[in-house]
Amino acid sequence: MKNTNLEKLNSAQAQTKRFGITMISPTVLVLLVMTAYPLIFTVYYSFTNYNLLKVLKNPAKFIGLKNYIDLLSNTYFRQAILNTVKFTILAVIFEMLIGFLMALLVNSLKRGQKVMRTLLLLPYLLPTVTVALSWRMMLSPNYGIVNQVLEALNLPVYNWFSDIKTAFGMLLLIDIWQSAPFVFLLLYAALQSVPQSQYEAARIDGAGALQTLFYVTIPNIKNSLALCALMRTIDSFRLFDKVNLLTGGGPANSTATITQYIYNFGIKALDFGFGSAGALVMTLLVLFLSSFYIKRAMG
C-alpha cells in the first residue's frame, strides 16, 4: 500500500514537473531567439570584417582581433570610454543620494505622501525625447528662459550644449533630474518594509536621527540600495538618446559615449563587425562595474 501511494506521489510530481516545463518552454524559446542568437552572432561578427554594403561582393572574412585593436587604439573611442565611465559614476552617486533623500523625506511625512509621490515621479514618467527637447528649449542660447533670467540678473550666459565647460555638466544634470525619481520610487518602497518595532527600539535606546539612519534604516534596505545602484549603472552606461539629441558627442568629443560611438561608426556606417566589437567591449565594462554591486547584494 505504501509503495502504491509512493508511486502515485512520484507520478504526480513528475506530471507537475512536465507541466511546468511545458508552460515555460515558449518563454525560454523566445528568450533564446531574442538574446542567445544575437549574442552568438555579435561575438562571431566582432572577429570579422562584416560590412553590409560590401558583403554581397566580398563575403565577410575572419580577421581575428583587428577590430578590437582598432577600437582600443582609437583616440575617439578611448575618450568615449572615459566619458561614459565618468558619467556613470557621477550619475549613480548623485541619483542614489538625491533619490534616497527624497524617499526619506516622503516617508517621514504624516500627510500628503500620495501627492508628493505623484509630483516627484513626473520627470521619470516623461519620455526621454520630450525631456531632452524641453531642456534644449530652456537652455537655448537664443530664446531659452535660463539665459534670459541670467541676462536680467547681469550674469554671464552660456551656449550650454556647445561650450566644453558646460555641455557634460548639463547632460549629467538632465539625467539626474529625470532618473532620481526612479531611485526614489524603489527606495521608498523598500522603506515601507522596515519594521516599525526597530525604530521604536532605537528611540527607547536614545538613538539620534543619524544613528537610526545608519544602524536601522540603511541595514534594512541595503539589498534594495545595491539593486537600485546596479540598475542605474547599467542604464547610465547605455546613455545615448540625450547625447544624440543635445550635443551629438561634442564639443570636442567631451560628451561622446560608447553607445554613440558604436552607432556612428558601426550602425550608421553598416560596419557590423566593428560595431559588434564595440558592443562587446561595452558589455564587458558594464559587467565589470556591475560586479561590485552584485557582490554586495550577494554578500
Image (spheres, rainbow, N blue to C red):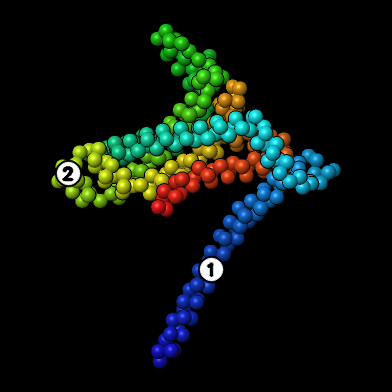
Q: Nearer the viewer, mark 1 or mark 2?
A: 2
> The residue tagged with tag 1: helix, strand or loop?
helix
Graded by Cα atoms within 10 Å as few (under 14), some (14 to 19) or many (20 or more), the crowding at tag 2 reads few
Is residue 127 among what the camera can see? no
Q: Residue 53's x, y, as percent?
A: 78, 39
> The residue tagged with tag 2: helix, strand or loop?
helix
> Label for residue 245?
none
Identified at 48% across, 29% down, the residue is 172
Q: Name which of mark 1 and mark 2 comes first in the sequence.
A: 1
Residue furthest right in the image: 57
- 217 left or right, relative to 273: left
Is residue 276 among what the camera can see? yes
Residue at label 2? 203
Q: Is residue 95 above or below residue 216?
A: above
Graded by Cα atoms within 10 Å as few (under 14), some (14 to 19) or many (20 or more), the crowding at tag 1 reads few
Residue at label 1? 21
